[in-house]
Image (cartoon, coloured by chain):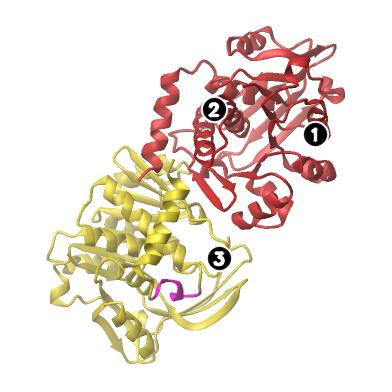
Chain colours: A red, B yellow
Amino acid sequence: MSLLIVGSLALDTIETSKGSVSEVPGGSTSYCSLAASYFSNPQIVGVVGEDFPDSVISLFEDHHIDLEGMQTVAGKTFRWGGRYAGNFDDRVTLFTELNVFETFKPRLPDNYKKASHVLLANIHPGLQHEVLNQLESEAFVILDTMNLWIETAHEDLISLMARVNMLVINEEESKMLTGKTNHKQAAAELRKMGPEWIIIKKGQHGALLFYEDRVFSVPGLILDEVIDPTGAGDTFVGALAGYLDQSQDHSFDNVKLAVVFGSVLASFCVQNFSVEGITYLKEEDLEERYDEFVVMSQF
Amino acid sequence: MSLLIVGSLALDTIETSKGSVSEVPGGSTSYCSLAASYFSNPQIVGVVGEDFPDSVISLFEDHHIDLEGMQTVAGKTFRWGGRYAGNFDDRVTLFTELNVFETFKPRLPDNYKKASHVLLANIHPGLQHEVLNQLESEAFVILDTMNLWIETAHEDLISLMARVNMLVINEEESKMLTGKTNHKQAAAELRKMGPEWIIIKKGQHGALLFYEDRVFSVPGLILDEVIDPTGAGDTFVGALAGYLDQSQDHSFDNVKLAVVFGSVLASFCVQNFSVEGITYLKEEDLEERYDEFVVMSQF
C-alpha cells in the first residue's frame, strides 16, 4: 500500500464568529495528509517557501507523513486569508498570495511513482495531469477540485476526469459541471465523464456516494459547536483516501466505511481552527466518534 | 390504539416545472391521514364545503379513514394555490381562499376523545389548543406548525408547545423560534419549551430526531425526479404518527423506525402531484422503499 497526495501547502489567516487565527497551517495537502495519516503513511508532493515553520514540518513528521516530495524553495509560502459569515454559509476570500506556489511543478520522487492510491487534492487541473503523467503504476485515483477550475480550466478538468476513478465534488460544483440540481441525475452525468465513483459533498448535511446504481448517504455529525469549517472537505477526502489505501478494498461496502471515516475526521476538523482538530488524535477518539455515527444513522 | 388528526382540508392548484393541476385534494389533513392510513385507522376532524368532491370522500373511505369528525357546511371548501421555482427551493403562494375554513371550530365526536395519539396538523395554534381541551385521554401529542403561526400567533404557539410530546418543525422555523442555526442548540432550546421529542425537517436532506442526548438522522431518498413537493412534510408526520399509533412504542429505537417510515411515505408523495403518490400503495411498495433506505444509510 502507498498513498500519494498532491496539492497545496499554505499559511492561512482565518476569521470566524468564534475567533481568528493567522499564519496557521493550511492548504489542501496539509488537511488531506494529516487526515490520511490515521490510516496510511501518505507521501506528499508540494512546495513551501523558506518561511514555512519548522513546527509544521515536525507535526507532519510526527504523523509519519513522507516529505521527500516536498520542495522548499527561495521565497514566501503560499498564503490565503478568508472570513466566514456568522452561520458559516458564506465565505469571503480576503487575500490570495500565491508566492512560491505560482511556479510550482509537481515532481514525484522515484519511490512515489508506484503508488497504489493517488489523491489529487485541490490544485490546478493542469498540475494534476502532470502528476498522473509521472506515475508508473495503475493507481486508484481520487480527484478533488473547486469552482475556480471549473470556470477557468474547464478543458483541463474535463480531460482529467476521464483519467480518474473517483470524483469528490460539492453540490454547487456538481451543478456547475452538469447543469443538474437533482443529485442522482448529476451523478449520472458526472460518471459519463469518466469516474466510476462520485461523491457529492453537502456540507453540514453530509455526503452522497454514487456507484453503479447504488447510493449511500452519510449524515453530517450533529455538533454542539462549529469553530472553523476550513479544510473540512480536504480532511474528508484525505481520511477516505487513507482508509482505502490501508484496506486496498474497493467494494461498495468498504467504500461506504471509507466515507464514514472521512466524515469522522471532518467532524473533528471543524471543531477547532486550522488543522488543530485533526492532530494527535488517539485511536479511541476515532472509535468514539465512529460510534456516534452508528447511533445517529443505524436503525 | 387510535389516532386523531386535526388540520385543514383543501382543494389545491399547483404549478411546478413538471406540470400543473387544479382543484386537487390538499390541506394538511388529507396528506396526514392518507399517509397514516398505511399503519393505523385515523379519525379526522376538519371542515369542507358542499363542493368537496365525492371522489375524495371515497378515497378517504377506501383508506379506512374515519370521517365522523369531518363537518360539511354550506359554502366553498378552503382553496390554496402555489407555484414552485424550477429547483423546488422556492414556493410562491398564488392565492389563499379560506372560505368555510374561516369559521371552523374543531368538534371532537365522543369516540375521538380517548385517542392514544393526536396529530395536531398544521392549522392555527388557537384551534390546536381547542382540540387538546376536548380530549379525555392522556394522549401522545404531535405538533406540526408553520412560519405563519410563529409570526402571527406566537403566544398561542408557545403555550401549546408546553402541552405536546413531540414537535415537528423545519429548519427555517426552528431558527425563527430559537434564533439558533446550529441544529443541536436549536433542539435543546425547543425542548426547554415543552416537547421531549424534536424533529427538524431538512427537505431533500432528510430529517433529524432529537430525544434526551440522542440524535438520529434519516437521509432524504435520492429520487430520479421530483414532481411536486406539496404535502411532503404532512405526509412525513402523518406516516410517523400512524406508525407510532400502530406500535404504541415510544422507545428511541421505535421512534427511529417511525421516522424512517415517515420518510418512506414522503418519498412517494413527491413523485406525483397532490396526494396521487400516496394513494393505493401496496405493502410491497412500502417494503421495497424501506429497503432502499436500508441500502442507502446502513453500513
**A90 or B63: nearer the viewer:** B63
**B217 or B159: nearer the viewer:** B217
**Secondary structure type for disc 3:** loop
Closest to the camera, between mark 2 and mark 1, is: 2
Please tell me which residue is depicted at 58% across the width and 48% down the height of the picture: A210
Measured as percent of width and height from the top left, residue A236 is found at: 58, 32
Read off the residue under disc 2. A247
Badge 2: chain ID = A
Measured as percent of width and height from the top left, residue A154 is found at: 82, 45
**Do the residues marked 1 and 3 share a common chain?**
no
Q: For residue B144, what is the image quadrant?
A: bottom left
Report, in whole angstroms, how far the alpha carbon at label 2 lies from the one at label 1.
Answer: 29 Å
Read off the residue under disc 1. A124
Measured as percent of width and height from the top left, residue A157 is found at: 79, 42
The number of numbered badges drawn on the structure is 3
Q: For residue B291, what is the image quadrant?
A: bottom left
Please tell me which residue is depicted at 32% across the width and 65% down the height of the picture: B125
Report, in whole angstroms, how far the alpha carbon at label 2 lies from the one at label 3.
Answer: 38 Å
Amino acid under label 3? Val
Q: Is residue A190 above or below residue B71?
A: above
Read off the residue under disc 3. B226
Q: Is residue B278 magenta?
A: yes
**Secondary structure type for disc 2:** helix
Q: For residue A45, what is the image quadrant?
A: top right
Please tell me which residue is depicted at 68% across the width and 7% down the height of the picture: A54
Which portion, as a residue range, is magenta?
Answer: B273-279
Report, in whole angstroms, how far the alpha carbon at label 1 lies from the one at label 3.
Answer: 36 Å
Mark 2 is surrounded, within 10 Å at the Cα level, by few (under 14), some (14 to 19) or many (20 or more) other residues, namely some
In the displayed structure image, the side of residue A107 where residue A227 appears, left or right: left
Can residue B23 be seen at all in this image of the molecule? yes
